[in-house]
Image (spheres, rainbow, N blue to C red):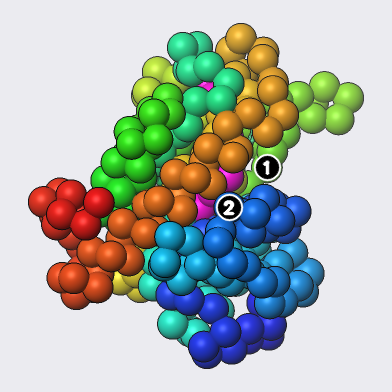
Amino acid sequence: MYHIMLGPGDIPSYVLLPGDPGRIDTIMSTWESAQEIAFHREYRSARGVYKGVEIGAVSTGIGGPSTSIAIEELARIGVHTFIRVGTTGAIQPDIEPGTLIIASAAVRFDGASHEYAYSEFPASATPDAVLALVEAAERLGYTYRVGVVASTSSFHVGQSRPGYKGYQWSRGDALMKDLQRMGVLSFEMEAATLFTLTNIYGLRSGCVCAAIANRVTNEFIKNKGVRETISVANEALRILARADKRYGRKIHSVTELYSVL
Ligand code: URA
């Protein structure tokens, strides 16, 4: 594949998608065995074994366009289950830094997904991926929230932060307040693209992010919760892979997921 530099058989069908290529090292350190397999542009890839299950990881870079390329190319070489592991900025006052945000769906401010479907098309996670992530977070004892995130194509002005020289426009002034009223949990930059493309293609996806910032309380704790997101995502992939093995690849019921824990 032109961008990710991988071909059929190079990577398992269950993959973690961090944004940051540097996070591939952290992910590899959580597996029993691991090897880096490619690194081209923002796409750094590794494969390994976690609790007996073969899984992979590919960094997407920041934002929808590079994420859409990763999904397009990984799908072509047999990847069917994607779990994004990222960071996010909470916009509800009661979400403490380090809390894990499991996205049930994403507001499509991403740009790239609009190249694929009407803006009314839902960017929703796959139900069994959400359940597997919740189960993993419960078992590991981490604090988490489940809900809607907003995926933007700009970190600064697009997330209601001032731009250079304090620039902001009327939409940015109102955006965060409106999303708070709608109960949206946080800002991030990739989930909407991932969820939209996988819905269209009949693939499976989920997303767990560490809330490293709270935009209301103005707290920021670099990397707080990042290791925990990786543990939760590894466990979720293991649960899904085992359920697929036992019941065939489909959207699993709670009973099926529970039976493979
Ligand atoms: N990622 C984002 O997109 N926004 C934040 O505030 C933090 C992480």
Q: Residue furthest bottom?
A: 8
Task: Give 3 or 100, whichever is nearer the viewer.
Answer: 100
Q: Look at the image and give the residue range highlighted in magenta.
A: 84-91
Q: On the rendered structure, is 212 left or right of 175?
A: right
Q: Dividing the picture into quarters, in which one does residue 216 lie?
A: top right
- Is residue 141 visible in the rendered structure shown here? yes
Q: Is residue 63 above or below residue 52?
A: above
Q: Disc 2 marks which residue? A: 30
**Label placed on residue 154:** 1
In the picture, measured across the screen, residue 149 lies left or right of residue 68, that is: left
Q: Secondary structure at mark 1?
A: loop
Residue 34 lies, with reference to residue 151, above or below; the image says below
Residue found at x 61% / y 18%: 215
| Image coords of residue 1 (percent x, y) | 63, 86
> Residue 206 location, x and y as percent?
40, 52
Q: Amino acid at mark 2?
A: Thr
Which percent across, then down, holds residue 54?
Answer: 46, 71
The type of residue carrying mark 1 is: Ser
- 141 and 184: which one is in front? 141
Check residue 87 for magenta coloring: yes
Q: Is residue 62 visible?
A: no
Prevailing secondary structure of the magenta residues: strand
Q: Position of residue 64 (x, y in %)?
A: 59, 57
Residue placed most toward the observer, 123 or 133: 133
**Front-most of residues 119 and 210:** 210
Looking at the rendered image, the disc whose residue lies closer to the viewer, 2 or 1, is 2
Residue drawn at 63 percent across, 28 percent down: 224
Most extreme residue toward the right, as rendered? 165
- Circle 2/circle 1 CB separation < 8 Å: no
